[in-house]
Every structure is written in structure tokens, then in C-alpha cells.
Image: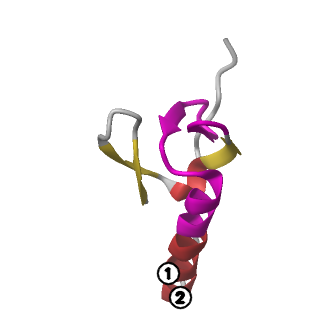
Amino acid sequence: MIIVHKLNGAEIRLNAELIECLEGGPQTCVILATGNRFLVVETPEEITERVVEYRRKVNAEGKAVNPIKGYKRENP
């Protein structure tokens, strides 16, 4: 998980393994593989740095992670 902040300042934790896309602008839209979207104040570069840091930590522990095992996206 990585910590980011919504536009109202609320702290949220996102599963870094589920981040599919980052859209920059005045705020950053984080799009997850589940289809959920979050607007946050951090820049795409800051989020990318946090994800890299998170993955280094996970890989150092030697654990394999499959964040979407068993997940099935339903198209509306």
C-alpha cells in the first residue's frame, strides 16, 4: 500500500499493485485495475516514486504478489 491524499486532504492508502494508469494535471487521477478512480494531490512522479519504493520493499522480502488473482472485471 502507498499513502496519498485526496483533494480534501484526507489520507488514503492505495494498493500499489492495482495502479493501472496515472493521469496528470492540476490534480492526478489514479486509475486502478478494478476500474476505481481517485483524484489525489500528489504528482504522477511522486506516486511513481512511492510505487517503486513499495516494490523494492516487497521484492526484498521475496514474496510474489498477484493482486488480481481471482478478480473478474465485469463490463457494464
Query: Does 75 sit left or right of 70 as displayed?
Result: right
Q: Which mark is residue 60?
A: 2
The quadrant holding residue 27 is: top right
Q: Position of residue 28 (x, y in %)?
A: 59, 40
The extreme front residue here reads 26
Amino acid carrying label 2: it is: Ala
Q: Is residue 53 magenta?
A: no
Residue furthest to the left in view is 10
Callout 1: 10 Å neighbours few (<14), some, many (20+)? Answer: few
| Residue at the (50%, 34%) spot, across then down | 38
Give left or right: position of 8 versus 51. left
* Image coordinates for residue 44, horizontal then vertical, percent: 63, 52
Q: What residue appears at the point 65 percent right and 29 percent down from the top-left corner?
A: 73
Instruction: For the C terminus, give its image quadrant.
Output: top right
Q: Which portion, as a residue range, is magenta?
A: 25-51
Q: Amino acid at mark 1?
A: Lys
Q: Say which residue appears at 58% left-offset and 44% top-offset.
A: 70
Q: Quadrant of residue 48?
A: bottom right
Q: Residue at x 64, y 60 (%)?
A: 45
Q: Could you say whether the residue bearing mark 2 is in a helix, strand or loop?
A: helix
Q: Are marks 1 and 2 in contact (CB under 8 Å)?
A: yes
Say if 20 sits above or below 53 in the image: above
